[in-house]
Amino acid sequence: MPETEFGSVYGSHVMLRVRQVAWPDQLDDPQTVGNFLRELVTRIGMRILDGPLTASEQGDTAHYGYSSVVILQESHAAIHTYPRLGQFFLDVFSCRPFDTRVVIGTCADFFGGFEIAEQAKLDRGLHWPGPATERLTEWTATR
């Protein structure tokens, strides 16, 4: 289990805002969007409990697109696409650490080249100092 100066880390939360997607038509296909989430969570070692659930939002250019989510044994992953703008938002929240480079690589495999407009990665579990670290080892083994 990774350690930081603040305590144990038991997971990661990655948020991306992506623009100038090379293959925006892929963002406009609900099957591709769902397949992307399935493949993404498999590559980062997560297990799907349910989903993907994919729904469309009809509307003007700024709002049209698809949202899809998978519920994981380890938490969730979600994508919101805006094909007419060539953009998407991605959120991967897990009680297991994972490699952000794998997330970005999977995005490239499904959507071609792109520019990352915003990226944030948060460590989860920093609020478990001291004795909780011992319990964290047991808890993590069950995830």
Image (cartoon, rainbow, N blue to C red):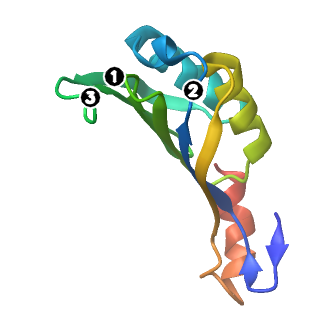
Q: Is residue 44 visible?
A: no
Q: Which residue is mark 1?
A: 54
Quarter of the N terminus within the rendering: bottom right
x 81%, y 78%: residue: 4
Measured Cα–Cα span from mark 3 to mark 1: 19 Å
Q: Dot 1, how many residues are within 10 Å of its Cα: few (below 14), some (14-19), or many (20+)? A: some
The type of residue carrying mark 2 is: Val
The type of residue carrying mark 1 is: Thr
| Relative horizontal placement of residue 50, taking residue 7 as reference (left or right) | left
Task: Indicate whether 37 appears above or below 104.
Answer: above
Q: Is residue 28 visible?
A: yes
Q: Position of residue 7 (x, y in %)?
A: 75, 82
Badge nearest the viewer, 3 or 1:
3
Q: Position of residue 74 (x, y in %)?
A: 57, 46
Q: Position of residue 63 (x, y in %)?
A: 25, 34
Q: Position of residue 31 (x, y in %)?
A: 43, 9
Q: Are marks 2 and 3 in contact (CB under 8 Å)?
A: no
Measured Cα–Cα span from mark 2 to mark 3: 15 Å
Q: Nearer the viewer, residue 140 or 80?
A: 80
Q: Dot 3, how many residues are within 10 Å of its Cα: few (below 14), some (14-19), or many (20+)? A: few
Q: Nearer the viewer, residue 97 or 56?
A: 56
Mark 1 vs 2, N-terminal side: 2
Q: Which residue is mark 3?
A: 61
